Image (spheres, grey):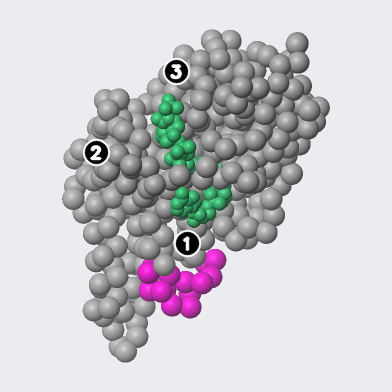
């Protein structure tokens, strides 16, 4: 079979349950059939493939770990991670859509929402009947979301919302937006804003060289009247959106391994077939160094991330541990993409191979959900007890 064989240098499969392996194989087969054949074309067109939403929902891509009573798949954290790994082997932009829907839209409604909100939104988000986006970043506040200026005030029957969010994945087509804004006392709350509310618009961001198959946009709130029942009642303060980020960052740590595996697999196959100076380039020491370092780094990332998943299953993973994995794995993947691209020589710059698309996608992944620098400073703060942010 030409079904992709993931590198498994340290027999990680022995640490996985039958359910984990089934979930991974199902996602892998779906990505091979539905994503790989079309993704380059959509990336070139800078268009999100809307028709895949139903399939993404069917493989459990939306809310894998949300309980089944709310329409989720009720899976554990390792299965969630493996789903993200396999989707991102296809494309980081498609994984972004799954991450946002699962961890940044369903998660806050599940964790901070009322029972009515959960029943109203979660089952439809799980099937993709409703799509969501998450608005934290603003034009003037990216790494420092605590300084946000988007705000709402009590206007009697409703809240009056004003401000703007920028760089929002899925914004151009989302039916609902979970957004974060300050009340009159400056306290951060989550609100569910619905498409069609007067004064709410979502212009698309164009000219991206990265995540081209993902739709990115702004969220503009111009005196939007938000019904009071759309406020998430059970958590407020900056730790509420940051808690969602923990879940998304964990998924990204797995996802990045998928992108790296695809680059490694492609480069290894190519190196064995490409002949120069009368022998395969895989036989040249410099190319072996690249490939050997790739599999070493992938293996280290797999073990780090599997352990993080078991800690999350036990409810014991810290935010700083998640930051370390997100930072390490995305950096690992982007370095592998750059090296793999060189192994393919000129062929590596074309869309006939996935590597350059992964490489460009990863430039967003290393910036969003906390930049490479921010995650280093989170580790620094954790080990020294001193914040270097401010
Ligand atoms: P700081 O004073 O440290 O913390 C404020 C409060 O939050 C608590 N906290 C956390 N809670 C839960 N989870 C975490 N990971 C937490 N980190 C901190 C903290 O204990 C405190 O609680 P309390 O009760 O004392 O109030 O906050 P700070 O203002 O110094 O900022 C800290 C910093 C820089 C680490 C944080 O703001 C940060 O992570 N910045 C990066 C911003 C970011 O990641 N944005 C992502 C936007 S969403 C996105 O990119 C989606 S892309 C998705 C896709 O397409 O896949
Ligand atoms: P800045 O915060 O301005 O940072 C610029 C540079 O300064 C970076 O290198 C950073 O590391 C560095 N820097 C900042 N502070 C410090 C410091 N204290 N010490 C040292 N260096 C520092 N956001 C959402 O809310 N929802 C989304 O769905 C979403 N999707 C995205 C999709 C894409 C394609 C992209 C590119 C971004 C997305 N984002 C989203 C936004 C993303 O989270 C932010 O871009 C990110 O948090 C960084 O903010 P910034 O771009 O404003 O950079």
Relative image position of residue 46 (x, y in whole percent): 65, 55
In the drawing, does residue 211 fall left or right of residue 320? right
The mark total stands at 3
The residue tagged with tag 2: helix, strand or loop? helix
Crowd rating for badge 3 (residues with CA inside 10 Å; few <14, some 14–19, many 20+): some
Rendering quarter of residue 311 = top left
Q: Considering only vertical position in the picture, is 69 above or below 83?
A: above
Which residue in the protein does label 1 denote?
359
Q: Quadrant of the C terminus?
A: top left
In the drawing, does residue 281 fall left or right of residue 39? left
| Structural distance between the alpha carbons of marks 3 and 2 | 25 Å
Which residue in the protein does label 2 denote?
307
**Going 73% across and 31% down the picture, which residue do you hit?**
162
Q: Earlier in the sequence, mark 2 or mark 1?
A: 2
**Going 44% across and 18% down the picture, which residue do you hit?**
68
Which residue in the protein does label 3 denote?
68
Relative image position of residue 203 (x, y in whole percent): 74, 44
Crowd rating for badge 2 (residues with CA inside 10 Å; few <14, some 14–19, many 20+): some
- Which stretch did the figure color magenta? 339-352
């Amino acid at each position: 079979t030409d079904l992709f064989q993931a590198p498994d240098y340290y027999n990680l499969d022995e640490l996985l349950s039958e359910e984990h392996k089934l979930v991974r194989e199902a996602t892998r087969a779906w990505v091979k059939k539905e994503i790989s054949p079309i993704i380059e074309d959509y990336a070139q067109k800078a268009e999100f493939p809307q028709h895949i939403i139903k399939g993404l929902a069917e493989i459990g891509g939306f809310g894998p770990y949300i309980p089944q009573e709310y329409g989720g798949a009720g899976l554990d954290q390792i299965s969630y991670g493996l789903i993200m790994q396999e989707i991102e082997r296809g494309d980081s932009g498609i994984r972004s859509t799954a991450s946002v829907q699962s961890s940044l839209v369903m998660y806050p409604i599940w964790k901070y929402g009322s029972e009515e909100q959960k029943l109203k939104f979660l089952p439809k988000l799980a099937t993709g009947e409703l799509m969501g986006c998450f608005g934290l970043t603003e034009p003037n506040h990216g790494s420092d979301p605590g300084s946000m200026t988007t705000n709402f005030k009590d206007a009697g029957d409703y809240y009056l919302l004003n401000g703007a969010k920028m760089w929002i994945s899925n914004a151009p087509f989302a039916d609902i937006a979970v957004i974060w804004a300050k009340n009159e006392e400056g306290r951060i709350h989550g609100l569910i804003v619905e498409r069609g509310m007067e004064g709410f618009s979502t212009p698309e961001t164009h000219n991206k060289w990265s995540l081209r198959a993902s739709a990115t946009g702004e969220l503009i709130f111009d005196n939007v009247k938000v019904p009071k029942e759309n406020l998430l009642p059970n958590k407020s303060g900056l730790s509420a959106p940051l808690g969602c980020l923990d879940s998304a960052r964990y998924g990204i740590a797995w996802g990045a391994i998928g992108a790296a595996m695809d680059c490694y697999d492609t480069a290894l196959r190519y190196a064995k077939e490409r002949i120069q100076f009368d022998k395969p380039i895989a036989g040249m020491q410099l190319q072996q160094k690249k490939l050997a370092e790739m599999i070493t780094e992938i293996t280290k990332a797999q073990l780090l991330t599997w352990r993080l998943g078991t800690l999350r299953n036990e409810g014991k993973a810290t935010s700083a541990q998640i930051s370390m994995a997100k930072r390490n794995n995305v950096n690992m993947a982007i370095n592998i993409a750059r090296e793999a691209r060189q192994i393919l020589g000129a062929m590596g710059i074309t869309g006939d191979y996935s590597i350059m698309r992964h490489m460009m996608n990863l430039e967003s992944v290393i910036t969003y959900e906390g930049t490479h620098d921010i995650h280093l400073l989170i580790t620094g703060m954790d080990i020294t007890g001193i914040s270097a942010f401010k």
